[in-house]
Amino acid sequence: MSDWYEIDKPASTIELDDRGLQYGDGLFETIAIRRGEPRLWDYHYERLARGCRALALVTPAVKVLRARLDAALANSDCDPLFCIAKIILTAGVSQRGYGRNLPSEPRIFVGVFPAAPVKRSSYVQGVATILCETRLATRSPLAGLKTLNRLEQVLARSECLPTGAFEGLTLDADGRLVCGTMSNVFIVKDNVVRTPSLERCGVDGTMRRHLLTLLESTELSCEVCDIAASDLGEADEVFLTNSQMGAIPVNRCGDHAWPVGPVTKRVLDLLANNGILECRQ
């Protein structure tokens, strides 16, 4: 069960006229809570602030948002040592129709959920993925952000469930590799780490950002660039990142198979040594 709060009070309902429900007019962040603290908090807040500017929402002050989060954690029955928090901002209730006054003061909801750790064997042996038929629309002005409209991800994720795959990888409308339904994707070729550019679509994940920053201080080469679907099959190694699990190796996607190679293991060590304890080998 999840516990939801609005202005430090339990919340269980939302008005039918709320723009978050009517139009997906809002944003969200899903944050790993580890040992009572929101992991990668600064990155989550920065992305939320970018989203507020893009949607013309008044950006909540960081101290206000953190206080709301801390209050929700204190009031929830979930274990604060290992759980998940979700912050939702909606544009609130306004006149009927798409248009609203700009900027709008957002409503803030904070939810706290139990967390289920990924199996240790998955970090050692890797996970299976599929290539989804659902394509992501390109050239969105909201590329990189986590808006409440996740219908493409819903459709793509629904393709995964019948297959038992851990994750589904998605392409954009032009056939470029973008990301997973709930993760960012990295490929390794000739010891160079590459991850897709997210300028056209996709979500700029906080763990992706954390890893890219860490890689700058290592001997590993890393490129953010366009990646064709065919590049996936030619990769030496593949791994995924997201805010909850850190990084996890991929051992298969359709007919393609990869080992859990030395670069991926180096990435896991790098994250483990920089606060992402799930990646300990």
Image: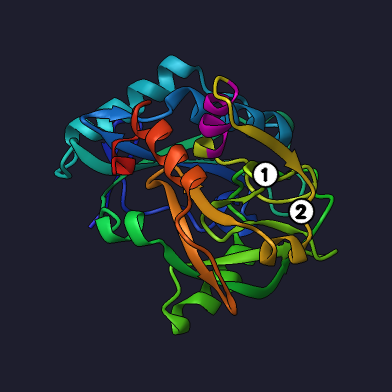
| Magenta residues (range) | 208-216
Q: In the rendered image of this protein, does residue 249 appear above or below residue 37?
A: below
Magenta region includes residue 209: yes
- Depth check: 259 or 47 in front? 259
Task: Kindly indicate the quadrant of the structure image that contains residue 64.
Answer: top left
Q: In the rendered image of this protein, does residue 42 appear above or below residue 118?
A: above
Whether the residues at callouts 2 and 1 have beta carbons within 8 Å, the answer is yes
Q: For the C terminus, which image quadrant?
A: top left
Magenta region includes residue 2: no
Residue 117 position in % (x across, y down): 26, 53
| Colour mapping used in the image | rainbow
Please tell me the numbered disc located at residue 232.
none
Local secondary structure at mark 2 = loop
Please tell me the numbered disc located at residue 194.
1
Three-letter code for the amino acid on which mark 2 is drawn: Ile
Local secondary structure at mark 1 = strand
Task: Kindly indicate the quadrant of the structure image that contains residue 71.
Answer: top left
Q: In the rendered image of this protein, does residue 240 appear above or below residue 258?
A: above
In this picture, residue 244 sits left or right of residue 146: left
Which residue appears at 19% of the width and 30% of the height? 74
Residue 28 position in % (x across, y down): 51, 43
Q: For residue 93, say whether it is visible.
A: no
Which residue appears at 62% of the width and 43% of the height? 191
Three-letter code for the amino acid on which mark 1 is drawn: Arg
Q: For the N terminus, which image quadrant?
A: bottom left
Mark 2 or mark 1, which has the lower sequence index?
A: 1
Decide whether the magenta segment is chiefly helix, strand or loop.
helix
Please tell me the numbered disc located at residue 227.
2
Q: CA distance from mark 2 to mark 1?
A: 8 Å
